[in-house]
Amino acid sequence: MADDSAFLAGQFDPPSLLAFVAVEIALSVGFLRLVDGAGQVSFAGRTFLGRDLDFGVLAGLEPVTDGMGDQTPALNIGINPPTPDAAAILGGEDMQGRSVLLWVGTLNTFTGAVTPDPVLVFTGEVDQGVLNVGLGSRRLDLSCVSIWERLFDDAQGVRLSNAYHQSAWPGELGFEYVTAVQRQLPWGSDTPRPAVVSDALKLRL
């Protein structure tokens, strides 16, 4: 972060430069690319718009928070979708896990050219969307988590059962009639302990 901070600090020295934040969110078809404020910016083969005709504008961005303990860095993105259909798409359950990228950069206010190179400050994925509707307002808040969230995947749901076995290998019936499967976890050794231990061995232990 020290190098990024030094880079950004240097970009704000000339009075002709303007800071911007750009967000890219993967959709089921294509990408939603938005920039804070009006107009548009282009870099890295991408074009970010201040207003997307289908999905609206950025309503706000909360600062990226550092994770502690079993939590990863997080980001909250507010979007004002223009229609209920757009809100339903962005807040749909199939959005969970879609990639999210966020850059911070500067551009020349006279030429409109982006100063190379914007800093990628967040790489993650959508966790969930919450739609807030008020009088004359519609805002969707996307809670996003860092890509490091996958390090906490503890494979919940993986079981020695016919249901899980069939979900992984359809048609394989090895567990179809197996019940009460138990897994022996050896203690203090990488090899399984014997099921029967003699009295003499117990005395030595």
Image: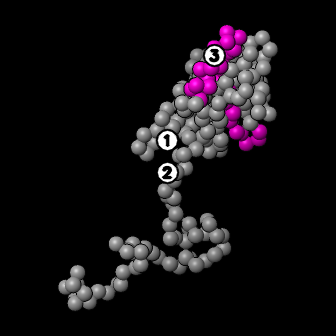
Give residue 35's quadrant in the image: top right
* Cα separation between marks 2 and 1: 9 Å
Give residue 131's quadrant in the image: top right
Nearer to the camera, 50 or 13: 13
Image location (x, y in percent) of residue 133: 58, 23
Assess disc 2: are there few (<14), some (14-19) or many (≥20) residues with their C-alpha within 10 Å of its C-alpha.
few
The vertical placement of 148 against 131, above or below, is below
Q: Residue at x 71, y 39 (%)?
A: 27
| Residue that carries the numbered disc 3 in the rendered image | 12
Identify the mark nearer the N-term, 3 or 2: 3
Image location (x, y in percent) of residue 149: 53, 46
| Residue that carries the numbered disc 2 in the rendered image | 152
Give residue 69's quadrant in the image: top left
Identify the mark nearer the N-term, 2 or 1: 1
First to last magenta residue range: 4-30
Q: On the picture, is 35 further left or further right than 64?
A: right
Q: Is residue 36 visible?
A: no
| Residue that carries the numbered disc 1 in the rendered image | 72
The vertical placement of 81 against 143, above or below, is above
Q: Residue at x 46, y 42 (%)?
A: 71
Image location (x, y in percent) of residue 32: 72, 32
Q: Is residue 140 visible?
A: yes
Q: Is residue 26 magenta?
A: yes
